[in-house]
Image (cartoon, rainbow, N blue to C red):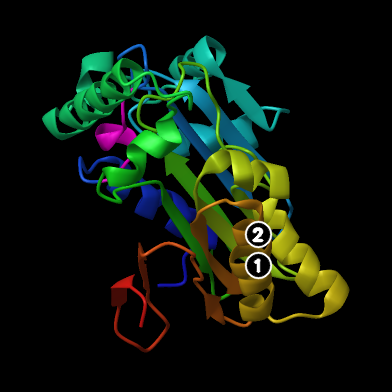
């Protein structure tokens, strides 16, 4: 309708955060302390301005707080109690931490705890971690949106509750600009999902943009180079959604599936889960 890509990204992610079906906002997973800690980021491809929050516990829609950080502060990232306080100061909706409780996520956490207990009892030398414990859980994960508006401006945003049974205080790639989120009108907008530590080490979102800028790769070629080669070779799992300045879309992943969808001007919405 002629709106901005930033508005489209924020408002779409807010809908996903309000749903208990996704690992963001209402549906966030539990930490090893039995709490919910939320991360989010947003970036404007026209100005390269960005905002992010990490470890927030009372903000109903972390993506909106990330945008406030971008537009109402001189900073890029705020974390923990400071981020929650900034939300309160700016009139953003706060909720009781119990709002984020869902039976589905609680039972998921309990299954992870039980598997780790069984591993310890079997005296396995391999220390159990959240990543391996999550392997048997359904792929209901991080949410992200990328958009191109009629003015030619790109934007990207990402929101997540992180890993099930993550150590409290852990921050993954989602709120880190360049790792989990990136947008530049000259190249593309990218949002990532997967094992965050690997995405941080590879600076995945920015690397896709850089390959387009410095090597002249298409968004599809750049995204596949990073996800199917670099990430896979390092042992990481996940995928990205990306759109370039011409509206070309890339959505590579190296897992069995990735919930994804797109809607091009003049077309119908397309939703996919597994490989074509």
What element does badge 2 sit on?
helix
> Does 171 sit above or below residue 182?
above
> Which residue: 32% across, 72% down?
274
* Farthest right residue in view: 214
Q: Report the residue at 65% width, 56% height from top.
A: 205
Q: Local crowd at mark 1 within 10 Å, few (<14), some, or many (≥20)?
A: few
The residue under label 2 is 233
Residue 160 falls in which quadrant of the image?
top left
Can see residue 233? yes
Question: For the magenta stretch, what is the residue range?
Answer: 22-30
Q: Report the side of 39 relative to 188 (left or right).
A: left
Residue 48: percent from the left, percent from the top? Answer: 73, 52
Q: Are marks 1 and 2 in contact (CB under 8 Å)?
A: yes
198 left or right of 273 in image: right
Question: Which residue was labeled with disc 1?
Answer: 229
Residue at 35% in and 17% down? 120
Which one is nearer the viewer's eye here, 104 or 85?
104
Q: Is residue 174 visible?
A: no
- Residue 19: x and y in percent read 22, 43
């Amino acid at each position: 309708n002629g709106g901005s890509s930033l508005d489209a990204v924020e408002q779409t992610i807010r809908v996903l955060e309000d749903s208990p079906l996704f690992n963001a906002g209402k549906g966030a997973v539990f930490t090893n302390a039995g709490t919910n800690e939320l991360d989010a980021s947003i970036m404007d491809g026209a100005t390269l301005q960005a905002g992010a929050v990490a470890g927030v516990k009372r903000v109903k829609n972390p993506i909106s707080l990330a945008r406030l950080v971008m537009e109402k502060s001189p900073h890029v990232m705020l974390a923990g109690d400071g981020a929650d306080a900034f939300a309160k100061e700016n009139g953003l909706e706060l909720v009781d931490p119990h709002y984020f409780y869902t039976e589905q996520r609680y039972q998921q956490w309990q299954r992870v705890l039980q598997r780790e207990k069984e591993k310890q009892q079997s005296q396995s030398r391999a220390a159990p971690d959240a990543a391996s414990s999550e392997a048997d859980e359904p792929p209901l994960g991080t949410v992200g949106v990328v958009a191109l508006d009629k003015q030619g401006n790109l934007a990207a945003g990402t929101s997540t509750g992180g890993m099930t049974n993550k150590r409290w205080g852990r921050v993954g790639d989602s709120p880190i600009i360049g790792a989990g989120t990136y947008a530049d009108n000259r190249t593309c907008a990218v949002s990532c999902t997967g094992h965050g530590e690997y995405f941080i080490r590879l600076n995945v979102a920015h690397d896709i943009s850089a390959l387009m800028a410095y090597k002249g790769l298409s968004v599809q070629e750049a995204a596949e180079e990073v996800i199917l080669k670099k990430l896979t070779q390092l042992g990481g799992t996940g995928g990205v959604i990306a759109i370039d300045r011409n509206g070309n879309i890339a959505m590579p992943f190296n897992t069995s599936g990735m919930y994804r969808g797109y809607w091009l001007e003049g077309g119908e919405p397309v939703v996919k889960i597994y490989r074509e």
